[in-house]
Image (cartoon, coloured by chain):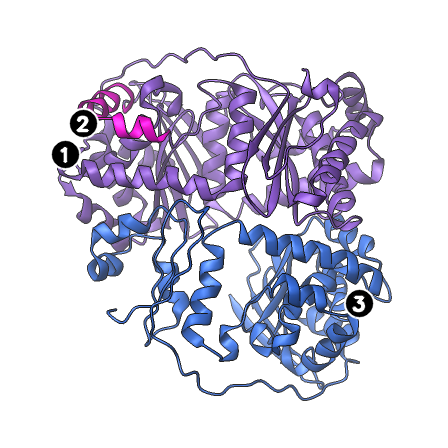
Chain colours: A blue, B purple
Amino acid sequence: MKYRTHKLENGLTILAEVNDSAYFAGYGFFVRTGARDESPEIAGVSHFLEHMVFKGTERRTAEQVNRELDDLGSSSNARTGEESTIYHASVLPEFQGQVVDLLCDIMRPSLRVNDFETEKKVIIEEIMMYQDQPPYGGHERLLASYFGNHPLGQSVLGTVDTVSGLSASQMMEYFHRQYSPGNMALVAAGNVDFDRLVDDATRHCGGWEPFEVHRDTRHADVSLDFDSMVKEQSAANTSCRCHPAQRPMTLIDMRCGSSTPFWAMMGKPFVLGIAGFGACRVGSHRQL
Amino acid sequence: MIHHEVLPNGLILVAQVMPWLQSAAFTLAFPSGCRFDPADRQGLSNFTCEMAFRGGGGYSSRELVEELEALGCDYYSSSGIYHSFFGGALPAENLYASLEMYVKSIGHADLPVDQLEDGRNVCIREIEGLDDDLVGRTMLALRSRYYGQPFGRNADGDMLGIQSINEQDIRDYYQNFYQPDGMIIAVAGQCDWQKLKAHVLKLTEHWAARATPMPNASGQQNGYHHIDHSSNQTHIGIAWPAAAFGSDEYYLNRAAIGVLSDGMSSRLFSEVREKRGLCYSVSASCHSIHNRGGVFAYSGTTTDSAQETLNVILAEARKLSEGIEPQELDRLKVQFRSNLIMQQESCRSRVSSLVSDVFYLNRIRTLDEINDRINALTVESVNAFLESNPPGPFDVVTLGEKALEVEREISHS
């Protein structure tokens, strides 16, 4: 495997892990933006924008974007987190040119108002869906409890109220504040033609105007209090704990397995106790 | 290269040698599963599976897990309708050592009585977890009605069953069903067939075989069933008959359901989510038991949108009988081809397919064979199939705050 990298003049990073013997290749845009870059009144805009990116551009309607992704036989998806938003598609190597064209194009979405209002309904459905599915709410509650008022404690999905109140112009303003080429990377892995990737990216993305992006990176005064969330409809209990010296995700992930260090740390009965995986109680704890 | 051989004790060994990978995956599928759970001990298969992975063959429960992790093995165990699965994926050079550990420990399980209550607690947590999984509850209720007993069961069992199971029940179940006749050991990844075969033969030569006849199925319940539940969303499950996996018409039906639900340009995604914004999740997929098939569709949506969502899904399913378009089939063929090739980079995915092929077809489909079947699909053949097999009759289950209106032909079927 070879690692290749290139930077366009406007700051867009192109990075690839090239494996000539792979059957497939994956391509994706990684954007350094997420819930931590939102102000409270636009909570959820990063994730909503992630949906809207698939809703068409100057060159393509939403229907065309969806159809092309299927025409290429792609396995594609997108996700938004606290710190990043990622769009990716895996295809057979013969479709590299087409999928890169498509991915580059949707990074400059039209954000049409009609599509915005229809998709808002989908986002609200998604929020309602997760509210019915513990322990999803628990994870966000844990981060909020741990990080307090720091931006890292903000919800990725936002709430029904904040999403309902969002306007297309607020989203456009956020887009023009965060999606600078210098704040993005085009990343590929697998059977990738890197030289062609650079050529195509230069052609499709070279004209994107760069601008400065600011991120609030102040130190987080984390909270070590116990917090609980009770859902009366929920049957099972789950405890999630944060260790002040580690990123919370590390330990949250570990609760799902029975790995040796976790056993050694917690003892088996606790592992068994949380293996049922349905949350109604979440908290950070001093003893870990 | 694919290998398939039945060993003298009835154990079926299958392997796909994938020399381009650095990893390997394997599974031991014992011919057990919830189909054999007594009616008053539902969950016995799952409970036994939990206990069988708690040490044996000289390994304690803790040693087993620690050594597997030292080998870099991403391990799992689970119980389904037809099998109890124990498997893992790991660096290829540790395959034989891990297999040996699995065969020795699970094939000679201690079933430690001092861990019986720990095991029971795990099973109880799994059942309680389902109370929080509204999608799972909806689809399990639908499958239970559609397939009947025992093939529509929740493999986790039920609370009464789990609480009734004692040590002897588990020992008897283990004695009866953890045996080689019909058991499948599947391996995919970088491995050597001759070495693998010799290894497995040596490890299992003393296992005694015991036949496990397939139980009979009860009848199904048709029509509409609503489960009252206070939740944000109403969950909708819809089932209708379909060609079973392995039947001549399977690929024709699979293509039709692909047009309905595969991809972001599929009819359901476009009509239900993209055009109307009715939901976040909508899908339909083919499912089979050993002698029957079905299509299972799902969507979850807020109470106010539920009726329209149900109506649109049913309308799109019915509309299939009017036929599919050439562009839809072309698009689907590319997706099928991509998925097939993508599988070649995943030993886990291949192991799962090997077990499924052997169990349902008693042979392994080659990549070329599947490709040929896909290429042979034409708009005419799919449409002729749909004309003579229009989707329906429909069984519907909903879970939420309010029952929905269903047509007379569904509610009275």
Q: Which residue is nearer to you in this view: B248 or A181? A: A181
The type of residue carrying mark 1 is Val
Residue ID for mark 2: B167
**Magenta highlight: main SS:** helix
Residue at 66% of width from left, 73% of height from top? A42
Residue range of the region highlighted in magenta in the rendering: B158-178
| Residue B122 coordinates in the image, percent (x, y) | 30, 41
Q: Is residue B170 in the magenta section?
A: yes
Q: Are marks 1 and 2 in contact (CB under 8 Å)?
A: yes
Tell me the chain of label 3: A
Regarding residue A92, the answer to whether it shows in the image is no
Nearest to N terminus: mark 1 or mark 2: 1
Residue at 49%, 80% (x, y): give it: A150
Cα gap from disc 2 to disc 3, whole angstroms: 62 Å
- Residue placed under numbered mark 3 in the picture: A111
**Kind of residue at badge 2:** Glu
Identify the residue at image location x=77%, y=84%: A209
Answer with left or right where residue A115 lies relative to residue B104.
Answer: right
User: Local crowd at mark 2 within 10 Å, few (<14), some, or many (≥20)?
Assistant: few
Circle 1 chain: B
Image quarter of residue A126:
bottom right
Residue at the spot x=55%, y=56% of the render? A21
Query: Is residue B99 one of those drawn in magenta?
Result: no
Q: Mark 1 to mark 2: distance in Å?
A: 7 Å
Callout 1: 10 Å neighbours few (<14), some, many (20+)?
few
Dot 3 falls on a residue whose secondary structure is: loop
Residue on which the image places disc 1: B113
- Whether residue B72 is visible to the viewer of this picture, yes or no, is yes
Compare residues B76 and B294 and report the one nearer the observer.
Answer: B294
